[in-house]
Amino acid sequence: MPTMRELSQDHKICAILRNVSDEIVVDYAKACVEGGVSQFEVAMNTPTAPWQIARLREYFGSSAIVGAGTVITPQRCKQAHEAGAQFFLTPSAAVCTLEYCRKSGIPLLPGVMTPSDVGLCLEYGFDLMKLFPAGDLPAGYIKSLKGPFDGTDYVAVGGVTPDNIRTFFQNGFVGVGIGSNLFPKEYAAQRRWDLAAQAVAKLVEAASGV
């Protein structure tokens, strides 16, 4: 199993799937893959998240990486693990998840916002973290964190859009997570997966070469 750092190096953009219907989840993910994004986070507060994780793992095999997000309780840890999630993400520094992933050897991108959050994650051996909500924080906030916490790196989640994605990378983030801003909602509603793939491709292009 690759480490979280290795996954981040290979996948600058993670597509966040939250409350995507079972009927279209494969087509939705296929459009992302066709656009150049092949790392997925299925949010565990989606009612059928374990099924979707297992379905995407089965469909894509080794051509995509499928993880579980919002893994903030012991029950969700167990459900995500059993469904075959290849990595976990959290919106906060949830101790139960930090302990579970360290014990189980599951790659984890823990959510942080404060220096205390960062310090806690480092205690558990996680030095790559998800800064959330990144879009609500000052542009220089990441530099302020990296000052005292040298050796740490961050993935931006929350508020990433096609218009600002490049700026996040320029500010020092090693990756981003994008949910509803992957492509316009009407593309999914109208099943225009060709247009969805084109929109994702533009995101990939904006993030490249930074």
Image (cartoon, rainbow, N blue to C red):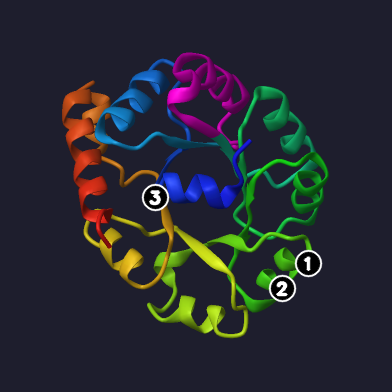
Classify mark 3: residues with Cα within 10 Å, few (<14), some (14-19) or many (20+): many
Q: Secondary structure at mark 2?
A: helix
The magenta segment is 43-66
Classify mark 2: residues with Cα within 10 Å, few (<14), some (14-19) or many (20+): some
Which quarter of the rendered picture does the N terminus lie within?
A: top right
Image-based side of 140 in relation to 65, left or right: left
**Residue at image point 22% right, 31% down:** 197
Q: Is residue 144 above or below residue 193?
A: below
Residue where numbered disc 1 is placed: 123
Residue where numbered disc 2 is placed: 119
Q: Position of residue 52 (x, y in %)?
A: 53, 22
In the image, what residue type sits under mark 1? Answer: Glu
Q: Position of residue 79 (x, y in %)?
A: 72, 29
Q: Rounded to the nearest whole Å, what is the CA distance between mark 2 and mark 1?
A: 6 Å
Residue 23 is a magenta residue: no
Q: Position of residue 169 (x, y in %)?
A: 34, 64
